[in-house]
Image (cartoon, rainbow, N blue to C red):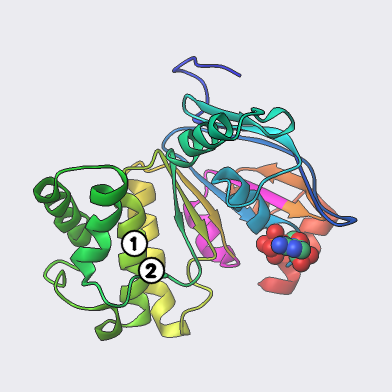
Amino acid sequence: MTTDPAASLVEVAGLAKSFGDHHVLRGVDFTVERGTATVLLGPSGSGKTTVLRSLNVLETPDRGRVRIGDAAVDFAALPRSKAERRRTVKALRARSGMVFQAHNLFPHKTVLGNLVEGPVQVQGRRREEAEADARALLAQVGLAGREHAYPAQLSGGQQQRVGIARALALKPEVLLLDEPTSALDPELVGEVLAVIRDLAAEGWTLVIVTHEVRFARDVADQVLFLDQGVIAERGGPEVLVDPGEERTRRFLARVL
Ligand code: ADP
């Protein structure tokens, strides 16, 4: 794989993963350009979340390569030494930030405490600097002034926006979002999607698993439609308007 700075930010090749005899990913290949939004869509169980978690090595694929920026892992040829393996995985993991369905905020820490924990404890950054960055991120997700609130004092939508800010606080090169609105009450979905739209407009590199097809149409530069562990169709947002594949068409007819 390349270290050419003009190359794609993310490169995924031949990703395969089985759970027992269930082949969940059967050779997934794609690239993500810097500053673009990629949306992973497809039926439940098609492997979307497994792809996303593989980019962050929360899931370890059986085969395939993932490169983000200058960090790459070949899962079929992981280093033999445990320490070396850990170093390789850690380098890749540090390039991305993950936003989960449920935000997983620390309940006993304030919003600010949640945001500075990773930068200070994991990245060894100075607290004052991390707090200044955290305040700027809170403003960006529409939560300026709420830094001293505890998660339980916030709505689900606000909590998820803190979850997004927390992932960004680690300064990832790409933000991975795993169905970021699926645990929310319907009336809170819009505010979270609006924040993600803003991030896309600002040039963040995003990879998003979502069932929100209309949102996907608005935000996606690239659409990857997964079916049974392979990318069955790919293209620009027009794929969601006029799909070329029958299985994409059937999926859209069900969810729209
Ligand atoms: P999607 O995100 O498209 O709904 P997933 O990637 O979550 O799909 O899951 C794909 C398939 O892999 C599903 O059939 C799921 O049950 C299975 N799967 C995911 N994680 C595990 C696991 N840890 N153990 C066993 N099966 C799993």
Judge left or right: residue 212 versus residue 169: right
Residue 216 figure quarter: bottom right
The residue shown at (73%, 67%) is: 44
For the question of whether residue 241 can be seen, the reply is: no
For the question of whether residue 237 can be seen, the reply is: yes
First to last magenta residue range: 211-225
What x and y, as percent, mark residue 95?
Answer: 43, 38
Count of numbered labels shown in the rendering = 2
Is 67 placed above or below 151 here? above
What x and y, as percent, mark residue 134?
Answer: 19, 55
The residue shown at (17%, 49%) is: 130
Cα distance, mark 1 to mark 2?
5 Å
Q: Which residue is mark 1?
A: 195
Looking at the rendered structure, which numbered label has been put on residue 192?
Answer: 2
Q: Secondary structure at mark 1?
A: helix
Number of other residues with Cα within 10 Å of mark 2, as a class: few under 14, some 14 to 19, many 20 or more: many
Is 156 placed above or below 17 here? below
Tell me whether circle 1 and circle 2 mark residues in contact (CB < 8 Å): yes
What x and y, as percent, mark residue 135?
Answer: 15, 58
Between 148 and 176, the one lying in front of the other is 148
- The three-letter amino acid code for the residue at tag 2 is Val
Indicate which quadrant contains ligand 1.
bottom right
Residue 104 figure quarter: bottom left
Quarter of the picture holding the N terminus: top right
Q: Is residue 224 magenta?
A: yes
